[in-house]
């Protein structure tokens, strides 16, 4: 093998595609000298391979990708580690180079934050939460994905499904650990060759970094086994989709989670209920940032156990926002450390920084405006009559990306979370995807997006 190893300096763009440039690994240095050039119009590149036109950037301008060495990942997947499982082929005859990447901020040439940098967008949202309420965010992104294998799938949730997929599960788990992603579990899921990997919670920015890294590490291990992992929100309209559930709790200066209050329903404090109300109020606009591909809305229809309705619930997987029940058996952690909100309406076509930042801003808006606590829905939202739906405040998510973008356009508060330039670029990318999706049947679109994510 060649002795030069490359490290990729990358950012996650508006369509959640990781792009960047590589440098020899041995030239990386933490002293600020390691940035590489970048071009504003790169942020108008779409996930379908085109440049969105018109876009606000044109051919001018220069930026830098500035590595954040707290988000430096190097994972070696030596050839000798890779065996052959059912349905996998061993590829190549030589060792694979390590996957080395550093997540970057997109900055101006003087090093200051660029107003369209997604990581800076999240940082700003987290700072606002801290400045307003003195609170930090703790989050984790729970991903589902599918291996694109021709072999017939084993049964849902079965041990058989997991064992047939070996060596993928153990290799990927190990690689994620080494990448600092802190995976908690590996689970076979409901759809064909579908798996889920929850990870440990981390501070806001690190949690979103982990989401970016997890996707790339999972893809890398699948590649090394001669297959592909797809995180596309919906591979087959007749099957369950691939969700990204964002779990979120808060920490005050004493390290206490103020979302928890033992005396209130589901243990959700008044502050937590207001935060949840803000997320629900802005749900339609949020979906333009959290479920933003042309196939995303099809995953979010009722009775897919994804997020069939805009409501808050406890033990109900049809709700956009859930308070996972507290485990009280011996050995379980303190309730305040367990209590969190689970936003079920995201998928991997969403940029994790934009998604989490927007959820935080929506929640903060609910707290600021002291919105009333949403009802905790204890039944299937799709079966509510009109009167009950109104009583419980249950609404529908936008039925298409076009409708989500309209909701964002009409929601002045949400639109202003993004700078005008970022908003314009984002809409340009999403409109380009929509134009290309026009008139294409869902089945075909799912295939197109399976090849992208
Ligand atoms: N696959 C479902 C989704 O699309 C999630 C199922 C579950 O794990 O609760 O979000
Ligand atoms: Mg799941």
Image (cartoon, grey):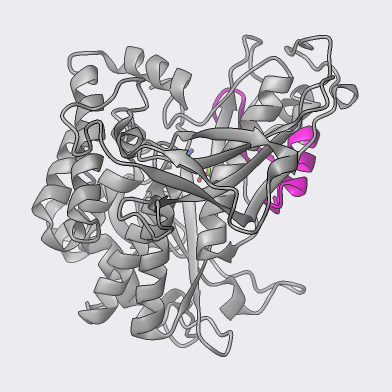
Magenta highlight range = 170-196
Residue at the outermost right position = 80
Q: Is residue 189 visible?
A: no
Residue 237 at x, y percent in the picture: 38, 22
Q: How far across and down, in percent of the image, does residue 151 sit?
A: 66, 10
Q: Residue at x 35, y 21 (%)?
A: 48
Side of 81 where 59 appears, left or right = left
Above or below 326: residue 207: above
**Who is closer to the viewer here, 343 or 127?**
127
**Quarter of the image holding residue 401?**
top left
Quarter of the image holding residue 338? bottom right
Seen at 62% across and 9% down, the residue is 150
Image location of residue 298, percent across then percent down: 31, 31
Q: Is residue 37 left or right of residue 221?
A: left
Residue shown at 39% from the left, 61% from the top = 112
- In the image, 389 versus 400, the foreground residue is 400
């Amino acid at each position: 093998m060649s002795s030069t190893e490359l490290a990729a300096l990358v950012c996650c763009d508006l369509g959640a595609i990781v792009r960047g440039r590589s440098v020899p690994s041995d030239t990386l240095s933490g002293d600020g000298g390691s940035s590489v050039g970048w071009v504003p119009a790169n942020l108008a590149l779409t996930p379908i391979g085109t440049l969105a036109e018109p876009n606000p950037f044109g051919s001018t301008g220069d930026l830098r990708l500035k590595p954040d060495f707290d988000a430096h990942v190097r994972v070696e997947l030596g050839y000798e580690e890779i065996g052959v499982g059912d349905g996998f082929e061993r590829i190549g005859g030589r060792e694979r180079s390590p996957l080395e990447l550093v997540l970057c901020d997109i900055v101006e040439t003087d090093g200051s934050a660029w107003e369209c940098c997604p990581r800076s967008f999240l940082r700003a949202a987290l700072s606002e939460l801290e400045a307003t309420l003195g609170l930090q965010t703790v989050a984790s992104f729970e991903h589902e994905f599918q291996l694109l294998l021709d072999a017939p799938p084993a049964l849902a949730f079965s041990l058989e499904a997991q064992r047939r997929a070996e060596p993928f599960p153990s290799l990927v788990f190990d690689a994620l650990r080494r990448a600092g992603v802190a995976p908690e579990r590996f689970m076979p899921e409901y759809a064909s060759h579908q798996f889920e990997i929850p990870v440990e919670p981390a501070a806001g920015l690190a949690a979103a970094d982990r989401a970016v890294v997890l996707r790339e590490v999972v893809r890398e291990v699948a590649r090394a086994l001669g297959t592909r992992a797809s995180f596309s929100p919906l591979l087959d309209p007749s099957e369950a989709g691939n969700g990204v559930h964002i779990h979120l709790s808060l920490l005050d200066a004493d390290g206490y989670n103020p979302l928890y209050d033992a005396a209130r329903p589901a243990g959700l404090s008044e502050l937590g209920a207001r935060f949840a109300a803000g997320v629900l109020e802005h749900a339609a606009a949020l979906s333009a940032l959290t479920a933003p591909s042309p196939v995303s809305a099809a995953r979010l229809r009722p009775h897919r156990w994804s997020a069939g309705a805009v409501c808050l619930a406890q033990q109900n997987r049809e709700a956009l926002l859930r308070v996972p029940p507290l485990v009280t058996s011996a050995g379980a952690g303190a309730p305040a450390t367990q209590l969190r909100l689970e936003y079920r309406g995201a998928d991997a076509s969403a940029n994790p920084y934009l998604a989490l930042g927007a959820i935080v801003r929506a929640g903060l808006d609910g707290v600021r405006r002291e919105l009333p606590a949403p009802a905790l829905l204890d039944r299937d939202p799709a079966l509510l009559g009109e009167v009950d739906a109104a009583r419980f405040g249950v609404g529908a998510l936008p039925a298409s990306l076009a409708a989500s973008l309209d909701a964002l356009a009409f929601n002045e508060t949400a639109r202003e979370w993004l700078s005008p330039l970022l908003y314009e670029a984002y809409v340009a990318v999403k409109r380009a995807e929509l134009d290309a999706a026009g008139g294409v049947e869902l089945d075909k679109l799912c295939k197109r997006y399976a090849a992208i994510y």
